[in-house]
């Protein structure tokens, strides 16, 4: 997918030097930068929470009822 970004003159110059040194296209350098950024700060895996309740002795509904029972005390 294509996207348009605006960069300052300094970023363009540094990007040009990097792409020449690495022997890659500007688009590849931007893809790598975005990939690295998302790896560090990206959205968590939505499936990461699947199975978290496994191994607990109390089922989820009982836990919920117990917590809500504290409201009436």
Image (spheres, rainbow, N blue to C red):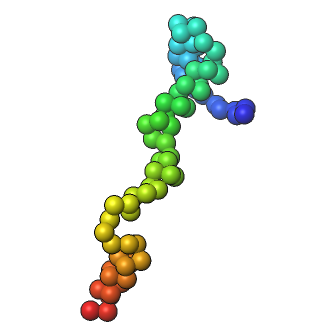
Residue 23 picture quarter = top right
- In the rendered image, the quadrant that contains the C terminus is bottom left
Count every numbered label the image shows and give the total: 0
- Percent coordinates x, y for residue 3 in the rendering: 70, 34
Q: Is 2 located above or below residue 21 in the figure?
A: below
Q: Is 63 located above or below residue 45 in the figure?
A: below
- Percent coordinates x, y for residue 24 in the rendering: 60, 12
* Front residue (pair 27, 51): 51
Farthest residue toward the bottom? 72
* Front residue (pair 44, 53): 53
Residue 54 picture quarter = bottom left
Left or right position of 38 against 63: right
Whether residue 40 can be seen here: yes
* Front residue (pair 32, 5): 32
- In the rendered image, the quadrant that contains the N terminus is top right
Left or right position of 53 against 70: right
Q: Is 72 located above or below residue 54 in the figure?
A: below
- Percent coordinates x, y for residue 39 in the rendering: 47, 36
Whether residue 17 can be seen here: no
Farthest residue toward the right? 2
The residue at the point 32 percent across, 82 percent down is 66
The residue at the point 57 percent across, 20 percent down is 29
Farthest residue toward the left? 73
Left or right position of 52 against 47: left
- Percent coordinates x, y for residue 22 in the rendering: 53, 9
């Amino acid at each position: 997918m294509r996207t348009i970004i605006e960069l300052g003159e300094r970023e363009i110059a540094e990007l040009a030097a990097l792409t020449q040194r690495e022997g890659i296209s500007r688009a590849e350098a931007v893809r790598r930068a975005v990939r690295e950024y998302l790896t560090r700060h990206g959205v968590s895996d939505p499936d990461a929470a699947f199975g978290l309740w496994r191994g607990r002795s109390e089922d989820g509904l009982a836990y919920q009822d117990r917590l809500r029972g504290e409201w009436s005390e």
